[in-house]
């Protein structure tokens, strides 16, 4: 199997940036137009964004389809086509709401559903291709590069599209959305051209030595494949870990700025800058993991440096550090304006960035473990868990803060209780991560031949760790 170099990884990062460009335009720009220009309730775009997350429970089915076909490129291209169509339809629906609100809302439901399906198909298969073709020593840095390019896609699209949209008009909204969607699809085609190979060449490249050595079997149906993956203890535990950790990660998104405003007296502009401070910390955390991975691979013969690139260590450490930062935010709610809030938020971002890249790199490693030809189902299962967690995160965080403020008179204490709960979730995530990838106990020399496994192929190797 030919491994991907940095050029090939960057090409997949460009595809991820194209996915992010369409998503940020529909979930942020259309959100603002509905609330500000059309004076619609904020609940409407909130429900539409939640719908696009909910639809992503289809990720395991999409991953299974790419497993059966053996090639990932058609699923990425097809998913991008659906995503681009969903973005254009959603913009058209937003414009239509001005003259026919019920019809526009119904069309928006359809458009945002397409966005969720497109992200499911393209994003899942892209991650599987990375997991199958990126060598173990590059997984952390590769995940960092791909996610940083996605963030760059967010930023560039938001900045350029924002300039094109002024002065706002429905025609400008449609033209900008159509242009961004068309460019994203065209760049995806260019980035993927010849990357995976063609026909038998591509199928052979995506087949590992373990797959070739395994006896040939009839491809199972989706339900059977999903049941087999769920029966793998490590895959099941990792699914729970992804859900809990991403729920903790996303639950503070919608309450951090209100917290800064109500407890520390931040203006809307200042609280927006505070969010930028957090994102800067996230980028730094990602870069630290990437550099540590490169150093660990370069000096693997030294025991000290070899552990510097441990994805397991960064995942565990990031979860614990995130819990500590959340506890510091909890203390900030009690202490009030005297607390160094910006520093705390920046450190929270660094911890979140390190944890997220460690988790994504571990996801890429574990996708190849267990029963062969199930990589797409595993990646889809974990992607679905992440999407559901992100969809629930904002709801859980805001509902918990509202409940706490109803029970507790002081806003600071109310927010503190919510941040403490999120810290607990991060600690639970760290415990789950430890159980998933704990080092295997060295086996003693066998005095007699080992008994055959009752279910060959279902047990996951836990010894080899990046």
Image: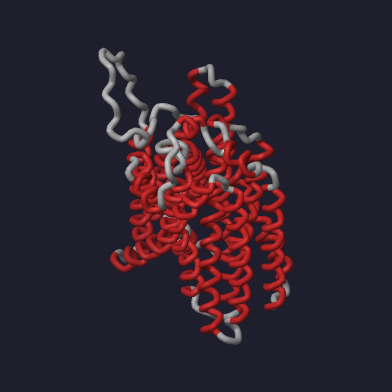
Residue 121 as seen in the image, left or right of residue 313: right
Tell me where residue 270 sits by quadrant: bottom right
Residue 374 image offset from top left, x and y in percent? 44, 43
Task: State whether residue 292 appears in this view.
Answer: no
Q: Determine which quarter of the picture holds residue 34.
A: bottom right
Q: Exactly how many numbered labels are in the figure?
A: 0
* Front residue (pair 29, 189): 189
- Left or right of 144 on screen, residue 412: left
Q: Is residue 283 left or right of residue 400?
A: right
Residue at 43% across / 34% down in the picture?
215
Image position of 412 with respect to 301: above or below: below
Q: Is residue 162 above or below residue 127?
A: below
Front residue of this view, candidates 317 and 432: 432
Residue drawn at (56%, 41%) of the image: 130
Using the image as rendered, state which of residue 132 and residue 218 is in the foreground. Answer: 218
Give percent across and percent down for residue 166: 72, 71
**Residue 61 visible at all:** yes
Closest to the observer, 288 or 370: 370
**Quadrant in the picture for the N terminus:** top right
Name the residue furthest bottom. 99
Tell me where residue 85 appears, x and y as whole percent. 62, 67
Q: Residue at x 51, y 27 (%)?
A: 308
Q: Residue at x 56, y 80 (%)?
A: 104
Q: Position of 181 compared to 97: left or right?
A: right
**Above/below status of 259 relative to 360:** below
- The colour scheme applied to this rendered structure is secondary structure
């Amino acid at each position: 199997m030919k491994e991907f170099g940095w050029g090939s990884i960057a090409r997949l990062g460009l595809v991820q940036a194209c996915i992010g460009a369409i998503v940020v335009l529909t979930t942020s720009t259309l959100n603002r137009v509905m609330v500000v220009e059309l004076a619609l309730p904020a609940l409407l775009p909130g429900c539409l964004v939640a719908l696009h997350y909910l639809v992503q429970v289809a990720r395991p089915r999409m991953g299974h389809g790419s497993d059966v076909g053996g090639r990932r490129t058609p699923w990425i291209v097809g998913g991008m086509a659906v995503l681009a169509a969903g973005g254009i339809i959603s913009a058209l629906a937003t414009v239509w709401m001005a003259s026919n609100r019920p019809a526009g809302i119904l069309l928006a439901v359809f458009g945002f559903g397409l966005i969720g399906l497109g992200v499911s198909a393209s994003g899942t298969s892209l991650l599987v291709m990375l997991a199958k073709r990126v060598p173990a020593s590059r997984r952390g840095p590769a995940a960092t590069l791909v996610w940083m390019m996605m963030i760059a896609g967010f930023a560039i699209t938001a900045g350029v599209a924002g300039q094109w949209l002024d002065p706002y008009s429905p025609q400008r909204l449609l033209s900008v959305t159509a242009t961004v969607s068309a460019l994203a699809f065209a760049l995806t085609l260019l980035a993927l051209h010849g990357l995976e190979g063609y026909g038998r060449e591509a199928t052979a490249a995506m087949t590992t030595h373990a797959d070739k050595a395994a006896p040939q079997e009839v491809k199972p149906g989706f339900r059977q494949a999903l049941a087999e993956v769920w029966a793998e203890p490590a895959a099941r535990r990792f699914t729970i870990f992804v859900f809990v950790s991403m729920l903790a990660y996303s639950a503070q998104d919608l309450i951090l700025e209100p917290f800064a405003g109500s407890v520390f007296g931040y203006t809307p502009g200042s609280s927006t800058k505070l969010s930028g401070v957090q994102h800067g910390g996230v980028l730094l955390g990602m870069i630290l993991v990437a550099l540590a991975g490169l150093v660990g691979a370069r000096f693997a013969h030294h025991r000290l440096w070899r552990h510097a690139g441990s994805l397991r260590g960064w995942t565990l450490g990031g979860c614990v550090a995130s819990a500590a930062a959340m506890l510091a935010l909890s203390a900030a709610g009690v202490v009030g304006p005297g607390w160094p809030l910006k520093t705390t938020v920046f450190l929270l971002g660094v911890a979140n960035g390190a944890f997220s890249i460690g988790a994504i790199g571990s996801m890429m490693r574990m996708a190849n473990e267990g029963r062969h030809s199930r990589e797409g189902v595993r990646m889809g299962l974990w992607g679905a868990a992440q999407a559901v967690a992100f969809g629930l995160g904002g709801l859980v965080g805001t509902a918990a803060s509202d409940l706490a403020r109803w029970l507790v008179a002081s806003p600071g204490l109310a927010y503190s209780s919510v941040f403490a709960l999120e810290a607990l979730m991060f600690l639970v995530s760290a415990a789950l991560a430890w159980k998933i990838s704990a080092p295997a106990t060295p086996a003693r020399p066998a005095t007699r031949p080992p008994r055959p496994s009752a279910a060959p192929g279902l047990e996951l190797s836990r010894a080899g760790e990046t």
